[in-house]
Amino acid sequence: MKFYVSLAFLDVGELVEIARAADELGYDGIAIPDHVVNLETLSTPYPYTPDGQRRWQPFTHWPDPWVLVGALAQVTSRVKFVTTVYIPGMRDPFSVAKSVGTAACLSGGRVEFGVGVGWCADEFALMGQAFERRGKRTDEMLELIRQLWQPGWTSFDGEFYQVPRLEMEPTPPRVPIYVGGLSEIALHRAARNDGWIGDLITTDQAIAAATRVREIRAENGLPLEGFEILTPLADAYLPEHFARAEQAGITGNITMPWMFYSGPSATLPEKIDGLKRFRADLGL
């Protein structure tokens, strides 16, 4: 199983050193969340907690993922970078393709594009994008973005985007697209792409999602080889927990190892020590 280190909710001043340590210690990747702003009041309840309250406090840092990848790529050599998750539907497809493609070039092909359709109608409104039909629009955006990442001239005639003949450079190395979400339509969207990426869920929930998305792949004659399933596992911390998840088809765990040793108030040295201890305790 692969292990990715999550940078969610951390002070931006710690990120370079954590990424450097993760790279040197043999972690497989860095996971980077996405929000443009944090609105004080929301009309949309947060969907990932029982009470609808957000998991972070006001004034938590949310650095731009692609600026961050460009920086972290310069102090690492092997870790990959995955977004958990980026919301393309809040942006225009050209800006997204340019930012992600540039980060992929700067990192030498180490970008994995984790995407979702988004839950926060207020943030969509602030960004000037329609919240309605965002799933269909995201599907079309991903199709267009893949074309913009190809060399040479391209044009596009879709329901939402009509694009005259143009080219976008630099052409990036291949960027796999992983899709998040637990609904049936989200799992079908993931199955059409290169992987599924989860939020913080139990191992049983992750296994159920992994089983279903793999079934959808098989039903559509799509190969399972190379299809990635990455997720945080809320109740996994021992080698046998991760072995069970891996046997069920989960290829990667997204984790914050210092939480097992020092908790959420860990200092930067404690975070790096947690990275070391976690790998030692798992025998990695």
Image: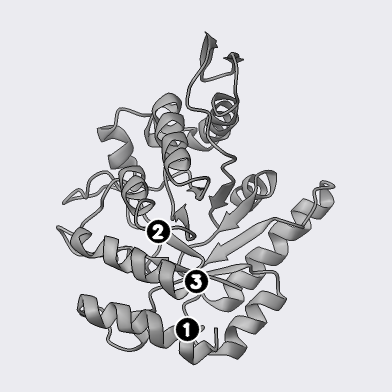
Tell me whether the residue at label 2 lies in contact with that at label 1, contact meaning CB atoms closer than 8 angstroms.
Answer: no
> From this viewpoint, which residue is outermost toward the top?
164
User: Crowdedness of circle 2 by 10 Å Cα count: few (<14), some, many (20+)?
Assistant: some
Mark in the foreground, 1 or 3:
1
Name the residue rendered at 28%, 61% in the picture.
16
Percent of width and height locating residue 39: 20, 48
Q: Name the residue at 57% across, 19% down.
A: 159
Q: Quadrant of residue 5?
A: bottom left
The residues tagged by marks 2 and 1 sit, at their Cα atoms, a distance apart of: 18 Å
Q: Quadrant of residue 246?
A: bottom right
Q: Does residue 228 appear left or right of residue 262 in this picture?
A: right
Please indicate, yes or no, whether residue 256 appears anywhere in the rendered image: yes
Mark 3 nearby-residue class (10 Å; few <14, some 14–19, many ≥20): some
Give the position of the C terminus as an image quadrant. Answer: bottom right
In this rendering, position of residue 115 left or right of residue 221: left
Work out whether 167 lies above or below 58.
above
| Residue receiving disc 3 | 201
Image location of residue 191, percent across then percent down: 68, 49
Element at label 1 = helix
Q: Residue 69 location, x and y as percent?
A: 37, 49
| Circle 3: residue type | Ile
Relative depth, front residue between 88 and 54: 88
Residue type (three-letter) at the residue carrying disc 1: Arg
* Residue holding disc 1: 279
- Residue tagged by mark 2? 76
Q: Nearer the viewer, residue 79 or 256?
A: 79
Quick one: label 2 or label 3, which is nearer the N terminus?
2
**Is residue 9 something that shows in the picture?**
no
Lower position in the chain sequence, tag 2 or tag 1: 2
Seen in the image, is 2 located left or right of residue 79?
right
